[in-house]
Image (tube, rainbow, N blue to C red):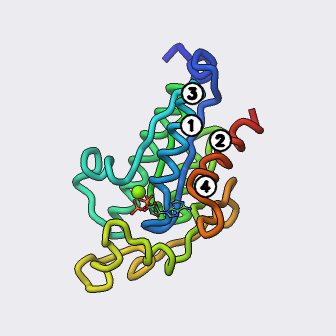
């Protein structure tokens, strides 16, 4: 391990970072994360997107949605994102990640300024009305247990680096706000 994180990210012309999007199901995390990924890629940045929908089918396919499994889910994702930062990448993480403690743990894995918590703030009524995957409907019918916001808690960030109110900001404008934040601090 002779090559440092600093030299790896300098070679890529960027500051290695975790962009951690948290929020309810259907809040807009994946939608916004994909737009951020595309914009940064177009700017010549080296990114990678970790999304609940892909990681849960592979790395974390042994995990369910109990509190214990949700904690382990986030621990593994945080470790992988931390390795990506070591590799000099901008890791974009789009997970509900409902617990404050686990998000704080993820933050501690990387250096100061390398963890950007983005609260995709969508009220449950709005998220439930969108329901693009029909999950709220299933949860209300009791076909899904431990669903965040219904019978499993969501702990909103108290001091996120970025808060996105999707009731007033389009997904495109949200992505723009995030990319601008990165530009301003470098
Ligand atoms: N301002 C907005 N920002 C983001 N998404 C929006 C916005 N307005 C409407 N939407 C819609 O809301 C839905 C959000 O779904 P998305 O899959 O991105 O949510 P998610 O937070 O990733 O949920 P999950 O945790 O279930 O993966 C999409 O259908 C998107 O088009
Ligand atoms: Mg998603």
Residue at image mark 4: 118
Earlier sequence position, callout 1 versus callout 2: 1
**Separation of residues labelled 2 and 3 (CA atoms):** 11 Å
43 shown above or below 105: above
On residue 179, the disc is 2
Could you tell me which secondary element the residue under label 1 belongs to? helix
Residue at image mark 3: 45
Q: Look at discs 4 and 2 and give the one toward the viewer.
A: 2
Q: Position of residue 7 (x, y in %)?
A: 61, 16
Earlier sequence position, callout 4 versus callout 2: 4
Earlier sequence position, callout 4 versus callout 3: 3
Could you tell me which secondary element the residue under label 2 belongs to? helix
Q: Does the residue at mark 4 contact the one at mark 3 (Cβ under 8 Å)?
A: no
Earlier sequence position, callout 1 versus callout 3: 1
| Residue density around tag 3, few if under 14, some if 14–19, many if 20 or more, within 10 Å | some
Left or right: 9, with 57 as reference point? right
On residue 39, the disc is 1
Q: Look at discs 1 and 3 and give the one toward the viewer.
A: 1
Residue extending farthest to the bottom is: 141
**Separation of residues labelled 1 and 3 (CA atoms):** 9 Å
Q: Position of residue 42 (x, y in %)?
A: 55, 29
Q: Which quarter shows the C terminus?
A: top right
């Amino acid at each position: 391990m002779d090559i440092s994180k600093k030299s790896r990210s300098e070679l890529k012309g960027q500051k290695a970072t975790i962009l951690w999007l948290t929020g309810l199901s259907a809040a807009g995390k994946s939608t916004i994360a994909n737009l951020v990924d595309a914009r940064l890629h177009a700017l010549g940045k080296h990114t990678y997107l970790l999304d609940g929908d892909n990681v849960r089918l592979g790395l974390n396919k042994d995990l369910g949605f109990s509190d214990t499994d949700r904690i382990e889910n986030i621990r593994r994702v945080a470790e992988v994102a931390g390795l990506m930062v070591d590799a000099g990448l901008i890791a974009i993480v789009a997970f509900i990640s409902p617990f404050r403690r686990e998000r704080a743990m993820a933050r501690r894995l990387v250096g100061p300024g390398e963890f950007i918590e983005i609260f995709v703030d969508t009220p449950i009524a709005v998220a439930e009305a969108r329901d693009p995957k029909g999950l709220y409907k299933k949860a209300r019918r009791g076909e899904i247990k431990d669903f965040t916001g219904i019978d499993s808690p969501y702990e909103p960030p108290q001091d996120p680096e970025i808060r996105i109110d999707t009731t007033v900001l389009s997904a495109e404008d949200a992505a723009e706000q995030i990319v601008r934040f990165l530009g301003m601090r470098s």
